[in-house]
Image (tube, rainbow, N blue to C red):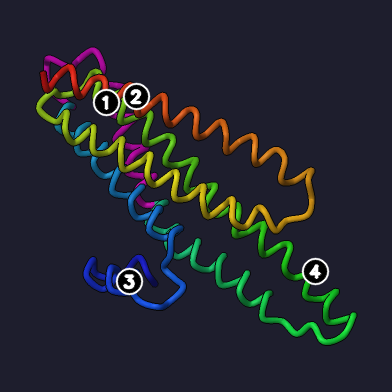
Amino acid sequence: MLADLTIEEFMSRLGSGDATPGGGGAAALAGAAAAGLVTMVARLTTGRPAFARIEERVQDIIREGDRLREYLLASVDTDAAAFDAVMAAYALPRGTEQEKAERKQALQPALRGATESPLAIARACLIISGMAAEMAEAGNPQTITDAGTAATLAQSAMQGAIFQARVNLKSIKDETYTGPIRQEIKRLEDEVQNATRRTLQAVEEKLG
């Protein structure tokens, strides 16, 4: 399992000639790091009298951040499996008309899986980005740089995941499937930009 590798082992694999882990796995790992930073900020905020008014929300962020960190770490392997399925479909023989039809039948579902896997990573990163903005604005100001780092990591992770989704999406022929996904991608990009802008504004204000 890729997620079970040490940091050094993972980075070595990432820089090798192996196809996995690739951009999707790197995006998932960056998103998990962003989630970890968000929960760290939240844990350094919770229980302090100065932040009692947001205590309930901070506890929610801790729970959700922990869940998303675990999900994104697991997604490193999920995304690699989705990519491997596409490569297996492309490798099918196509010497006869029947083989071509069977290959096509296998390829389109595999491409959908390889689109939906990074898209799920992107959705998770948007949630993390929003939580980073909340913590930057209302959390412990001593952790403002960690909140800022979380936000920028989450945005980069989302963009990387979206790249992986789009490269597979372009090979899917069903417009009734691709159209709504392209619309969702645009919404995700717009919303993460807004969340990151909020965070960075809070960072600049508190850094002075």
Q: Which residue is mark 2?
A: 197
Residue type beneath disc 2: Arg
In the depicted structure, whether residue 107 falls above or below residue 73: below
For the residues labelled 4 and 1, the Cα–Cα distance comes to: 46 Å
Residue 178: horizontal and vertical position, in percent? 71, 45
Q: Residues within 10 Å of mark 1 (few under 14, many from 20)?
A: many
Asked where in the image residue 87 lies, by quadrant, the reply is: bottom right
Q: Is residue 65 in the magenta section? A: yes
Residue 16 versus residue 60: which sits nearer the camera? 16
Residue 50 among magenta residues: yes
Q: Secondary structure at mark 4?
A: helix
Q: Which residues are magenta?
A: 46-70
Find disc 1 in the rendering and name its residue: 200
Q: How far is the residue under mark 2 from the one under mark 1? A: 5 Å
The residue lying at 39 percent from left, 45 percent from top is 68
- Say few, some or many: other residues with alpha carbon within 10 Å of mark 2 (under 14 / 14 to 19 / 20 or more): some
* Residue 114 image point, x, y percent: 59, 59
- Judge from the rendering whether residue 99 lies leftward or rightward of residue 139; answer left or right: right
Q: Could you say whether the residue bearing mark 1 is in a helix, strand or loop?
A: helix
> How far separated are the C-alphas under marks 2 and 4?
43 Å
Disc 3 designates what residue? 15
Reading the image, the residue beneath label 4 is 105
Task: Please name the amino acid that badge 1 sits on.
Answer: Leu
Q: Quadrant of the C terminus?
A: top left
User: Given contact means CB atoms under 8 Å apart, are the residues at marks 2 and 1 in contact?
Assistant: yes
- Say whether disc 1 or disc 3 marks the residue closer to the N-terminus: 3
